[in-house]
Image (cartoon, grey):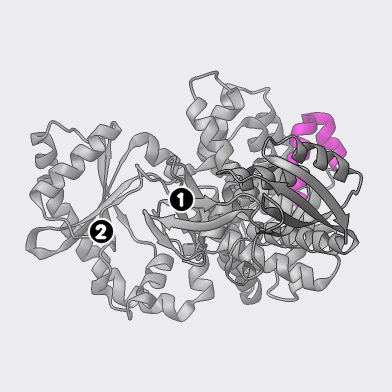
Amino acid sequence: MVIERLIKEKPDGIVAKAYQLAKQAHNGQVRKDGTPFFSHPLATAENLAKWHLDEASLAAGLLHDVVEDTGITLQDIKRDFGTEVAFLVDGVTKLKRLKYQESPAMTAIENMRKLIFALSEDLRVIFIKLADRLHNMRTLDALSKEKQKRIALETSEVYAPIAYRLGMQNLSGELQDLSFPFLFPKENKWLRDHIQELYLEREGYLKRVTPLVKKALHAHGIHPLAIDFRAKRYSSLYQKLTRHNMDVNKIYDLVALRIIVENVRDCYGVLGAIHEMWPPLPGRIKDYIAMPKPNGYRSIHTTVIGPDKKYIEIQIRTHAMHEENEHGIAAHWLYEQYKIPGLHHEKASRLTKELKWVQQLKRWQEKYQDMEAQENSEDFLDAMKVDFFKDRIFVITPKGDVVDLPAGSTPIDFAYYIHSDIGNTCVAAKVNDKFVSLNHELRSGDLIEILIQKNKKPSEDWLQFVKTIHAKEHIKAALRAKDARLRDKHKATKVEVRIVTQNRLGLLRDISGIIARSHFHIISMNTTKQSTIKFPIMRIECEIEDTKKIERLMLKLKALREVQEVSYKII
Ligand code: MN
């Protein structure tokens, strides 16, 4: 037990103090399953320790239930542990008051907002909540059927996706697996009856081929740190089966072989050595090292045809990647804490990038908070569902940056993600060097190039197909600005400018340039040649908001060498 070891090392530290206080405060309380209540906060803190969280988080984990369930107050905690621990405990206590319900919509939205707020204020509150939930899910059996279902649903729909987005996919998967039997009891039974044997069979097969893998790697001078098996989780297996007519033979990664090596070069070395021995299945090589998943996941996956023509999915990664894949953002926490200059710079900047979506959520929630109407709140929830909980794709900018967007996003969504000006002035898009329509659905791995035209305005049609709320809002704002300008035009004065001028190549462009720079809006331009005058006459009809500017424009036009005569009249 990490916590007990830590207490021995630092008997006067805040973790030791929190342990004592929580144990005392919960003394005599028992959980539904009959165990002493203190086992729960202790298990919560153990989870946090496994994710390498800091001491304040561990102390808060131990104390997370005392304010609600014992006589200890938040002031007591503040006095004895300081504001940081008190802040974390308070955050978790507030989150606990959320009761997830499928309906009414408003409650769900309200809860979501509080969650987002906690997310953006201090991620450690969420880590503690996740650690708390993990232990509660592991001990859910003792509760009533109704409670089991509610908690399992909330875990599956809210907390597991949050863990996933934080890059803690192991935790996310475990939460989904723990929820699964409560949400899908029949399906769970079916899987147990049909899959268990197959799992064992697949594992036996992989055990038999492992020595072959080792031998092949050694022949290439690669010495893996570890080779193990990862059985596919029931919850994700079930989802996959529903897409494959429940045909288990179509699932190649029922049990995957996982190879952990020292460095990135070895990862590709392993891939080469394996492909030399067993032919890869076309289209099944996924290089998440070159192109990490949006949540930061890095690994190489390949499926090969092994001995007896059986498929083997192989996952290759370094030890550091493995750690990060398991712990996600939590794994970065330690580095952030100590802020070691330079050393962990790359990790710190990845962390900030990953947090960008949290900041975005925070901005939306602030925006939507002011809108009282139910209608808008539903928009918000829809947006949340699309942008936060649904599948994501990742596409690439011409500079090679990876952009994380909801599935179904279009070039317009991409353009607005890059910058609102790019979105507003977008006229065409190239995907993998081919022109596509602006409502083209982007796919992961697409390289996107946006073509813009200055002063172009977004089109109202775009609202029909854009996916991100970010794009929608910018389009609406730009359309509103356009409307306002159109209204202003009614107040604008129409002027006809008459210019008698010699002709010259590029003169027309110079004249229209001068007019545009003076903020005159050109409506029409035409040139006539009258037999009575030596030079052609140019008539330009334009709109202006400020009539005082006309005289200045006249002077500027007269300054052009070819211009003989300039006059104007207000229409
Ligand atoms: Mn708890």
Q: Looking at the picture, does residue 428 appear above or below residue 499?
A: below
Q: Main secondary structure of the magenta part?
A: helix
Query: Does the residue at mark 2 contact the one at mark 1 (Cβ under 8 Å)?
Result: no
Question: How many residues crowd around disc 2 within 10 Å: few (fewer than 14), some, or many (20 or more)?
Answer: few
**Residue stretch in magenta:** 73-94
Please give the label number shown on residue 449. 1
Query: 570 or 380: nearer the eye?
Result: 570
Q: Position of residue 217 (x, y in %)?
A: 14, 38
Q: Position of residue 320 (x, y in %)?
A: 38, 34
Residue 505 lies left or right of residue 201; in this view the side is right
Residue at left offset 87%, top offset 42%: 551
Disc number lying in front (2 or 1): 1
Which is nearer the N-term, disc 2 or disc 1? 2
Which residue is under mark 2? 284
What amino acid is found at the position of numbered circle 2 in the picture? Arg
Asked if the beta carbon under badge 2 is closer than 8 A to the nearest atom of ligand 1, the reply is no
Query: 73 or 360: nearer the eye?
Result: 360
Residue 184 lies left or right of residue 519; in this view the side is left
Query: 474 or 386: nearer the eye?
Result: 474
Locate residue 491: give its quadrant: bottom right
Residue at left offset 77%, top offset 68%: 377
Residue at left offset 11%, top offset 35%: 218
Residue at left offset 43%, top offset 78%: 187
Q: Position of residue 386 (x, y in %)?
A: 59, 65
Q: Secondary structure at mark 1?
A: strand
What amino acid is found at the position of numbered circle 1 in the picture? Glu
